[in-house]
Image (spheres, rainbow, N blue to C red):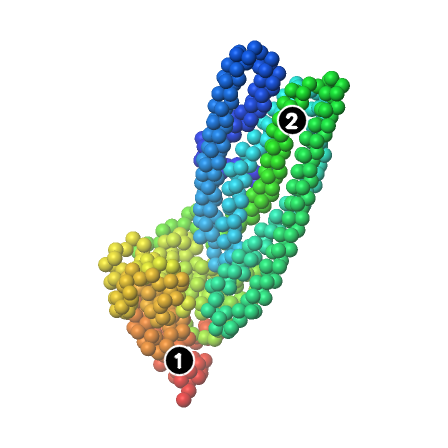
Amino acid sequence: MKQTLKRLISYYKPYMSLFLADMFFAILGAGITLAIPLIVRYITNHVITMEAGAALDKITVLGIVMLILVAVEGFCNYFITNFGHVMGAKIEYDMRAEIFEHYQKLSFSFFNNQKVGQLMSRITSDLFDISELLHHGPEDLVISIIKIIGSFVILFHIDVKLTMIAFAFIPIMLIYALYFNTKMKRAFKRNRVKIAEINSQIEDNLSGIRVVKSFANEEVEQEKFEKGNQGFLAAKKNSYLYMAGYHSGLGALTTLITIVVLVAGAVLITYGQVNVTDLITFLLYINTFTEPVKKLINFTEQFQNGYTGYERFMEMLAIEPDISDHPEALELKNVKGNISFDNVSFHYEENTETVLNHINLEVEAGSYMALVGSSGAGKSTLCSLIPRFYDVSSGAVKIDGTDIRDVTLKSLRNQIGIVQQDVYLFVGTVMDNIRYGRPNATREEVIEAAKNANAHKFIMALPKGYDTDIGQRGVKLSGGQKQRLSIARVFLKNPPILIFDEATSALDNESEKVVQESLEKLAKDRTTFVIAHRLSTIRNAQKILVLTDTGIAEEGTHKELLQKDGIYAKLYSMQFAG
C-alpha cells in the first residue's frame, strides 16, 4: 500500500504550485473559521462591558474585520472549488492518457480475453472517483485536522472539563468508523466489478443491436440485462447498508457531543464554574469541531471510492504487453517483400492445441500467395504472425532475411496493409476513414486512392461526397462500399506487403467483382497473401497453399492442384458442383 500511495501522490508533481496554492487557501479558510468565534467571545466578554460610545466604535471595527474575514474565506472557498477541481481534472486527464496509451500497447491476446465495457469503466468512472479523491482528499484532511486541533486547543483554554467531555467521544467515533470503513471498502470494490460488468453488457448489446432485432430477441437481452442489473443492485444495497450505518452513527455521535456539552455546561453554570459567555463560545466551537468530523466522514467515503478505483487502475497498468520492441530493435526500411516461415509453430495460450506445426515457407517479393483450407486450419493465424499480432511459439518469421522480432513493431506494421472481411470504419467522414491509411495525406492523395479502389464514383454520389458522415461503423454504406473504402485506405498507405483476409466472401456477386478488381489492382507488384473462401477469386494466384490441421498439405497453381485431384480439387468441385 505504501508503494501504491507513493505512486498516487506522484501525479501531483506537474501541478505542485497549484496544489500548494490549494493547500494554502484551505489552511487560511480553516484559520478564519477558528478566528471568528474568538472575536465573538471578545465582544461578549469585554466589548459589551465598555462605555456605549467606545463599545460602538469597537463593535464597528470588529464588524468590518469580520466582514473582511468572511470575504477572504469566501475567496478561499472559491479558489478551492474552482482551481482545486481544475487540478483534479488535469490529473484525471493525465491518468486517462496514461491508461489509454497503455491499452494501445497491449496485444491481441489481451483483448481476446477482455470485455470492452469493463475496459471503458476503468477509463471513465474509476478515474473520476480517483480525481475527486486527489482534489478533495488532501484539502479535506488538512482543513479537518486544523479545525479539530485548533478547536481542541481553544476549547481547552476556555474550559478543561467541557473539552474533556467533548473529546471523550473521539475514541468511540474512531472505533466505529474503523469497523464500517473495512466493510465499506469491500463493498465499494464489489460495486466497481458490477459497474464494469453492466457497462460491458450494455456495450455488447448496443454494438449488436441489429442482430438482436433481426432475431426479435429484445426480451432475451432484457432478461440478460435484468440479471446483471439485479447483481449490481444487490452490491449497491450492500454498500448502502454499511454507508447508512456509518453516516447515521457518526451523525448521531456528533449531535450527541453538542447535547452532552450543552447539558454539562448548563450544570456547571448553575454551580458558577462556567459563565454564559464561555458556554456560547464553546457551543460555537463545538459546531466548528463537528463540521470537520463530517468532512472526515466524506473523506473516508471518497478514499474508499477513489482508492479502490486506483487499485483497479494500477492492476491494468501492471499488465505487461506480451508483444513489444526489445531495446535493440531496428527500423525496418527499404522492404522488398521476401517473406519466410522458418519451422514455425504456434499456439494461442499455454496448454492449448498447436494451431500451426513446423511450417516452412518461402515467399518471394511480389508473389501472389493464396491460402485455402477448412475453418480452423490456421489460415488467418499464419497471416497474423507476419505483422506480429501474435508471436510464434517456436521458429521465426523473416522479412528480407530479418527476423521480425528484431525490428520495431511500428516500422514492421507500416510495411503491411490488411484488408479484412469484417471492415471496421470509424465514426466520421469518408475522408477521415480513407485518410486513416496515412493521416498526413493531402485531399488529392485521398481522392486518388479512392479512384484506384473503384470507390470515387459512389463517394461522389453521397450527399456530401468525401465529407459525408458514414455513421457508427459505416452503417450508412453497403458491404461492397465499406470494403472499397478499406481498400482505398490501404492504397493510400501504399505498403509493399498485403494481406487479404477473406475480403470478398461476405459480398454479393456484383460487389465481389468490383472489389476483386480493386484488390488485384492493389496487389500488383506487392507481396500478397490472400485467405480465400471463394476459390474462384484465386485462380490467378502464382501459388496456392492448402492448409490442414497437420500443416501445408498441398501447394501449387490452380491448374496444378486440380490435376493432383487432392484436397484442393475436392474443395473446388464442392463449390462448383452443378
The residue labelled by disc 2 is: 283
| Residue 533 % position (x, y) | 42, 75
Say which residue appears at 39% left-offset and 82% top-offset: 562
Which type of secondary structure does the marked residue at label 2 adopt? helix
Q: Residue at x 45, y 38 (%)?
A: 86
Q: What's the distance in space between the residues labelled 1 and 2, CA to CA?
A: 98 Å
Left/right of residue 439 with respect to residue 171 in the rendered view: left
User: Is residue 15 or residue 241 the one in the foreground?
Assistant: 241
Q: Quadrant of the C terminus?
A: bottom left
From the top left corner, tell me how far across and down residue 118 is, in percent.
53, 55
Residue 539 position, x and y percent, is 34, 78
Few, some or many residues within 10 Å of mark 2 (<14, 14–19, 20+) = some
Q: Are marks 1 and 2 in contact (CB under 8 Å)?
A: no
Identify the residue position indicated by label 1 in the image: 561
The answer to whether residue 363 is seen in the rendering is no
Disc nearer the start of the sequence (1/2): 2
Question: In this view of the protein, which residue sits in the foreground, 164 or 137?
Answer: 164
- Using the rendered view, name the quadrant where residue 273 is placed: top right
Indicate the secondary structure of the residue bearing disc 1.
helix
